[in-house]
Structures are given as C-alpha cells and as structure tokens.
C-alpha cells in the first residue's frame, strides 16, 4: 500500500481522538482519547520515516510513547487523587482548580 | 498480500478508535484501545518498523493498559456521576447538553479530518504516493532493534537521557499525586495500627512507604 493510505488512517484516528476529547466527560476516557491522538501522530511519523527510509521518525515515535507513558502516569495519579477526595469524576463538574 | 493485511489492520485500528470514543463503560473503552493498539502494531510492522511495533505491544498494550484497567477497576461505577444518571439514556455518556455537544464535537472533528487530509495528501510530495524508500532485508537495516539502538545511543543520546529523566520525574509525580492525604483514611481499618516498621523507622523520613501513604500519621 502506498504511504498515502497510512497517512489517511492516521488522520482518521487523530480526528476520532479529538472528537472523544471534546465530547466525553469521564477524565479516564479523555485520557484514552488523548492516547488515540498520540497514536495517530505516531502512525504518521512512522509512515514518513518509511517514506524517506530514515530512522529519525522512528526515534521520535519511541520518544512520543515515552511522553505518553509519563502523561498516563500523571493523569491517572490525578484521577485517583480526585476519587480519594470524593469529588465527582467528571470534567464538566470539576470547574474549580482550588483544592 | 500486504494490501489484505493492511485493510484488516486498518479496520481494527479505526474500529478500536470508534469504540474508545463511543463506549459508555470506561472498562470497555480501555479494551477497545487494546484492540486499536495491537492493530496499530500490525500497521507498524507493515511499515517495516519492527522495533517500534514490539515496543507498542509490550509497553502500550502491556504496561500502560494494565495501569488503565487497574484505575478503571478502582474507580468502578462512580465513573458515571449523578448528572449522568439523571440524564441516563443511550447518549448519557455525552452529558446533560448531550445533543449539542455531540453535534458540535462531530462537526469540529469532521472539519479537523478534512483539514488533515488536505494537509497530508495535498502536500505535493511525490513520495507520498510511493511505497517508500528502497528496502533491503538484513540484520542491521532499517527498523531493526540494532538499527534503533545504534541511533539512540549515538545521534539521539541526549534525547534518550532526557526521556529517561522525564520518566523518573513522572513516576515520582504519580506517587505523590496518588498518595493518601491525612483525614481521608477512614475507610482503611489498618490506618491507626502500629506495625513493626513504625517502631524500627522514625516517621517523616521520606521513605517510599510514606510516599504511598501507608505510614501517614
């Protein structure tokens, strides 16, 4: 398959992730949709790396996975902290940043 | 043959993504993301990125998804709040203003998709329509672990070290964020019990056990 097909799939996945981030209200699912957006970007990076036959894009994809793991760690820690404080787990009802 | 595998894997990728966005139960959304990730690893293999595909399956579909599943199980049914229960229905996951939000989100997502497709496919790069750069199979060629490791430890050494430090900081931050604060431990019967560790080690010495809240005063 030509590279354009892979790029189309990556664009679809990115757009689906963006829709999820905008519409879902459970922060856990919002994090999952952020993962979808990162994966769309990763697929585009890998496809472009294959297009040029150059490894730099693959290194960048691995680094993106690292940053995604960090983001999951912090995000899930925040969700657990919210749950421990008996606050609603809902991004619409968590309007205030004060503790 | 590669076209057939591509279409099967791309179907899995997009179906998994739709499942993550639409499924109401967060636990099922996590499982849909696992399907998405494994299909994506197949696409990476088709793009001759063996190492990244392996990392995708081991790190993402393995480790990160275990984190997600454990947090989804920990939070349980409270993932849907009172507001969602009041508006229970087929689209309750989208909130009280469900219809407007759904419509707006879909419109914005569609606009984003069109824009991305124009940007990606209308670039004028001729190589986009090709099958990629020439490729010769071998032990140290493009995409193998040896190739990636060589790049990571020579040209991208600084990036590698910075990423490892970032992981360390994020792990410490996760522990600090999720630890138990004082005054909220009434559901834990072991909270006030004296253990041998309390006698052997003084309080507030910054141990890992205190970090996770098991020895908070």
Image (cartoon, coloured by chain):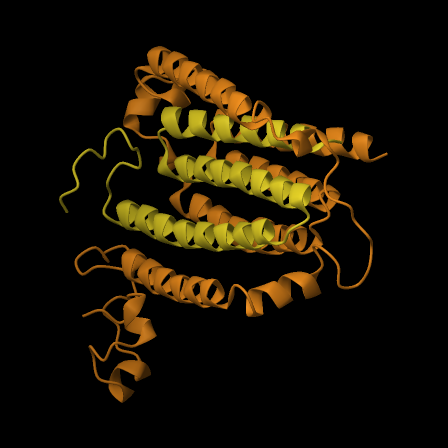
Chain colours: A yellow, B orange
| Residue toward you, A62 or A32 | A62
Q: Looking at the figure, which quarter contains the C terminus of chain B?
A: bottom left
Picture residue at 40% right of the left edge, 12% below the top: B103
| Left/right of residue A43 with respect to residue A79 in the rendered view | right
Depicted B195 relative to depicted A38: above or below: below
Q: Residue A13: x, y in percent?
A: 55, 30
Picture residue at 23% right of the left edge, 30% below the top: A93
Q: Residue B64: x, y in percent?
A: 51, 52
Picture residue at 79% right of the left edge, 34% below the top: B5
Picture residue at 67% right of the left edge, 54% below the top: B54
| Residue toward you, B129 or A31 | B129
Q: Residue B207: x, y in percent?
A: 30, 77
| Left/right of residue A6 with respect to residue B191 in the rendered view | right
Q: Quadrant of residue B32?
A: top right
Q: Quadrant of residue B44?
A: top right
Q: Is there any visible trace of residue B88 in the rendered image? A: yes
Seen as rendered, the residue at the extreme bottom is B200
| Residue toward you, B140 or B111 | B140
Depicted B47 relative to depicted B112: above or below: below
Seen as rendered, the residue at the extreme right is B1
Depicted A40 relative to depicted B15: above or below: below
Q: Residue B112: x, y in percent?
A: 45, 22
Depicted B109 relative to depicted A75: above or below: above
Q: Looking at the figure, which quarter contains the N terminus of chain B?
A: top right
In the rendered picture of this protein, how many numbered marks are placed on residues?
Answer: 0
| Left/right of residue A60 with respect to residue A49 in the rendered view | left
Q: Is there any visible trace of residue B214 in the rendered image? A: no
């Amino acid at each position: 398959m030509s590279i354009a097909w892979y790029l189309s799939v990556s664009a679809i996945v990115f757009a689906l992730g963006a829709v999820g981030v905008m519409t879902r209200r459970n922060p856990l699912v919002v994090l999952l949709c952020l993962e979808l957006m990162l994966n769309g970007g990763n697929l585009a990076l890998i496809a472009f790396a294959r297009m040029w036959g150059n490894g730099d894009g693959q290194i960048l994809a691995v680094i993106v996975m690292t940053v995604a793991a960090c983001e999951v760690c912090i995000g899930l820690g925040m969700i657990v902290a919210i749950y421990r404080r008996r606050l609603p787990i809902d991004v619409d009802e968590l309007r205030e940043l004060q503790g | 043959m590669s076209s057939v595998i591509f279409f099967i894997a791309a179907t899995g990728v997009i179906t998994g993504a739709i499942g993550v966005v639409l499924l109401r139960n967060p636990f099922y959304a996590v499982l849909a993301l696992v399907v998405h990730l494994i299909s994506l690893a197949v696409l990476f293999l088709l793009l001759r990125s063996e190492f990244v595909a392996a990392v995708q399956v081991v790190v993402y579909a393995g480790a990160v998804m275990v984190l997600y599943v454990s947090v989804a199980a920990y939070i349980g049914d409270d993932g849907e709040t009172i507001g969602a229960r009041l508006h229970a229905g087929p689209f309750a996951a989208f909130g009280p203003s469900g219809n407007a939000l759904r419509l707006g989100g879909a419109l914005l997502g569609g606009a984003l998709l069109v824009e991305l497709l124009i940007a990606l496919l209308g670039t004028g790069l001729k190589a986009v329509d090709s099958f990629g750069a020439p490729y010769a199979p071998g032990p140290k060629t493009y995409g193998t672990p040896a190739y990636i490791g060589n790049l990571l430890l020579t040209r991208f050494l600084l990036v590698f070290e910075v990423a490892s430090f970032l992981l360390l900081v994020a792990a410490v931050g996760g522990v600090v964020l999720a630890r138990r604060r004082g005054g909220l431990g009434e559901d834990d019967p072991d909270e006030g019990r004296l253990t041998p560790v309390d006698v052997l080690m003084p309080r507030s010495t910054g141990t890992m056990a205190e970090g996770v809240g098991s020895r908070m005063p």
